[in-house]
Amino acid sequence: MQKLVLFDFDGTLADTAPDLAAAANKQRARKGLPPLPYETFRPYASHGARGLLKAALNMDPDHPEYEIFRQQFLTDYEQDMTTLTTLFPGVKSLLATLKSNGYTWGIVTNKMEYLAVPLVVHLGLYTDCAVTVGGDTTSHAKPHPAPLLHAAKAAGFEPADCIYVGDDERDIIAGKAAGMATIVAAYGYCGKETALQAWQANAIAQSPADIWPAVQEWAVN
């Protein structure tokens, strides 16, 4: 029986944090503040503009300037989002292995489609990617299961025949709520101090190379 492997994007397939950090530091520059080190922003790279503006400016959505800076952050990021972004080491090999073994794979991200799709194309993933679901593709974003259910339906699979791989707790929450198996991408942006076992995923991958064995184990159970 065929299976579908769905991936989060930021922190799971692609190391997007350097370009996100650069856009966040541009917002500090607009405030006349010095740049913060990359390491400050990396743990927030899966949290979107809200997380990065919190890290950069300690700015929450109820701040009167939040929407102005959110829009500027997204504009700055879109202009330079392919400068430093790469696939994590081992991802190309993983995807080739999935393909050669008859697995279908796709992407479900909270990144808005207008940002996600160009990056998927830029990184050479578009041809083999069965479905790309962004944060605005459905009426809900993760941790709601709607994006994952949409992806499964679009690719022609039942949720029980899908496994979702992500580096954030909301990925695991969404996957489980959708009735899918889940794998934590521990090499992503979740942070070394995070108690990943508490998320109760089916497996924890310390590198992309760990994902294929975990998928195989899930598929035979």
Image (cartoon, rainbow, N blue to C red):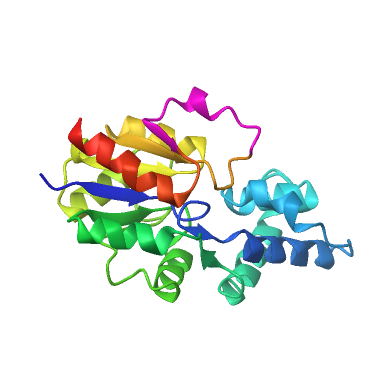
Viewer-nearest residue: 220 or 1:
220
In the rendered image, residue 196 lying in the magenta stretch gets the answer yes
Does residue 71 appear in the picture of this structure? no
Residue 138 pos. (x, y %)? 34, 50
Of all residues, the one furthest to the left in this rendering is 1
- Residue 73: x and y in percent read 66, 64
- Residue at image position (39%, 73%) is 124
Residue 1 coordinates in the image, percent (x, y): 10, 44
Above or below residue 175? Residue 77 is below
Residue drawn at x 30%, y 63% as measured from the top left: 96
Which quadrant does the C terminus fall into? top left
Q: Is residue 73 left or right of residue 35?
A: left
The structure residue drawn at horizontal position 44% and vertical position 51%, both measured from the top left corner, is 208
The number of callouts visible is 0
| 132 left or right, relative to 56 | left
Image x and y of residue 29, in percent: 83, 67
Residue drawn at (27%, 51%), measured in percent from left and top? Answer: 151
**Which contiguous range is marked in magenta?**
192-204
